[in-house]
Image: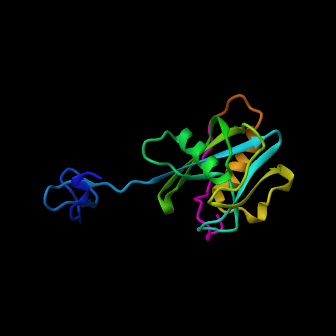
Amino acid sequence: MKERDKGPRIRKVPAGDNRQRLVCPDCEYVAYENPKVVVGVVATWEDKLLMCKRAIAPRRGFWTLPAGFMELGETPEEGASREAWEEACATLEIIDLLAVYSLRHISQLQLFYRARLASPDVSAGIESEEVGLFSFDDLPAADLAFPSVHWAIEHFQRVRDAESFVPFRNPPGHSGEMNRGR
């Protein structure tokens, strides 16, 4: 952490800006608060999809795709691969970008990639209760953790054999909020 990042902060509109920011009253350093980037994969082995049952909050006990917050100093693809390893001890090859989802209510930008598992040998990492390879007909659809997991699986199924396509985004009218029906 840099020395300037340790000082006191007040909320004010800095010179040349039009919204309140966290600003050091001594040196005028602006500490920007930016959206968080989540990276994940829709990873397959033959015709089966890798899913992880969450061992941590939020949504502990619900199924998800391998995904999590991107770390400083890594590319989105590296982050998605790292998350697959951390959650499912899975080694994979990123194929291409599947979708970019914007979850404004929690200030997240989510990037999901299509990926191919290097082998079917997967096991639960520290953030997962269990992992599994599911046929698309046997997915635990009623127990999926987040709206974006539903979206990514649906979008993947639409382009699973496509050579190229335009990456998807939020379905029309959907913000990703869990308790508002959309």
Q: Residue at x 74, y 32 (%)?
A: 162
In the displayed structure image, the side of residue 106 where residue 24 appears, left or right: left
Which residue is situated farthest in the right direction here? 137
Residue 169 on image: x %, y %: 60, 46
Q: Residue at x 77, y 65 (%)?
A: 142
Residue 54 on image: x %, y %: 66, 63
Rendering quarter of residue 35: bottom left
Q: Is residue 117 magenta?
A: no
Residue 129 on image: x %, y %: 70, 63
Q: Residue at x 20, y 54 (%)?
A: 29
Rendering quarter of residue 93: top right
Which residue is situated farthest in the left direction here? 26
Number of marks: 0
Query: In terms of depth relative to the viewer, which is nearer, 70 or 22?
Result: 70
Dominant secondary-structure state across the stretch colored magenta: loop
In the displayed structure image, the side of residue 50 where residue 15 appears, left or right: left
**Type of colouring:** rainbow
- As drawn, 181 above or below 64: below
Which stretch is magenta? 167-182
Query: In terms of depth relative to the viewer, which is nearer, 100 or 9?
Result: 9
Residue 115 on image: x %, y %: 68, 39
- As drawn, 33 above or below 78: below
Q: Is residue 171 magenta?
A: yes
**Quadrant of the image for the C terminus?**
bottom right
Which residue is situated farthest in the top direction here? 163
